[in-house]
Amino acid sequence: RRLHLVDLNGAFAGNPVNSEAITEIAKSYPKVPIQIGGGIRNATTIEAYLNAGVEYVIIGTKAVKDPSFVTEMCRQFPGHVIVGIDAKKGLVATDGWAKISEVKATDLAKKFEHDGVSAIIYTDIDRDGMMQGVNVKATADLAKETTIPIIASGGITNLDDIAALLKNAHYGITGAITGRAI
């Protein structure tokens, strides 16, 4: 169980915009593990979040544009780095989903196999927030391609979606993020 937070303003800006609010949440609920994404593009930001009580930082856009950054952050902050892979039709989206790259989600995941990434959050952005059901096939296909634990995101609508993911857990799907369905 974790609280998943995203600084969407930060994702567009390329640096944290709502870090004060996130820090306040972490301090107010010290027993709740928190993972934060959005605008995390340097070690200073990661260190500040971890010092504030956040347990995991999610690197998305920077993971696509500079994969060596993930490698270095895993060395500096072992056990605290998650890679966020947001994809549309299998291609990675960046900059708060504003741009679609030519990088395949599976290829990006494979780059981090030996870096010490704690997990990959995989979001099918065609389904996120649409209440249409999670893309179980794409999530399972990604999980089959890597040994990194996969956290499903995007489209969870009800317990049937969770059950469908559980049927594929043996591939390495270890969790799911839900927002609107709650």
Image (cartoon, grey):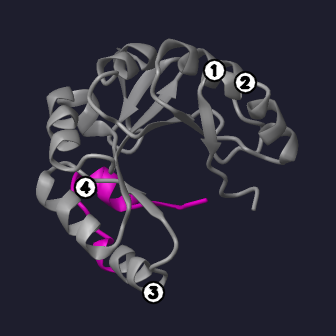
- Disc 4 target residue: 13
Numbered badge on residue 168: 2
Q: Quadrant of the N terminus?
A: bottom right
Please state the horizontal and vertical placement of residue 134, each as a whole percent of the image: 71, 34
Please state the horizontal and vertical placement of residue 12, each as a whole percent of the image: 31, 51
Reading the chain from its start, which is encountered first: label 3 or label 1?
3
Query: From mark 1 to mark 4, how far is it between C-alphas?
Result: 35 Å
Of circles 3 and 1, the one toward us is 1
Q: Residues within 10 Å of mark 3 (few under 14, many from 20)?
A: few
Element class at badge 2: loop
Element class at badge 1: helix
Reading the chain from its start, which is encountered first: label 1 or label 4?
4
Of circles 1 and 4, the one toward us is 1
Q: Is residue 23 above or below residue 38?
A: below
Of circles 4 and 2, the one toward us is 2
Q: Residues within 10 Å of mark 4 (few under 14, many from 20)?
A: some
Asked whether disc 3 touches disc 1, contact meaning CB atoms under 8 Å apart, the reply is: no
| Three-letter code, disc 1 | Tyr
Please state the horizontal and vertical placement of residue 163, each as a whole percent of the image: 83, 37
Tell me which segment is drawn in magenta: 1-20
Element class at badge 4: helix
Numbered badge on residue 171: 1
Q: Is residue 130 magenta?
A: no
Asked whether disc 1 touches disc 2, contact meaning CB atoms under 8 Å apart, the reply is: yes
Asked whether disc 3 touches disc 4, contact meaning CB atoms under 8 Å apart, the reply is: no
Q: Is residue 16 magenta?
A: yes
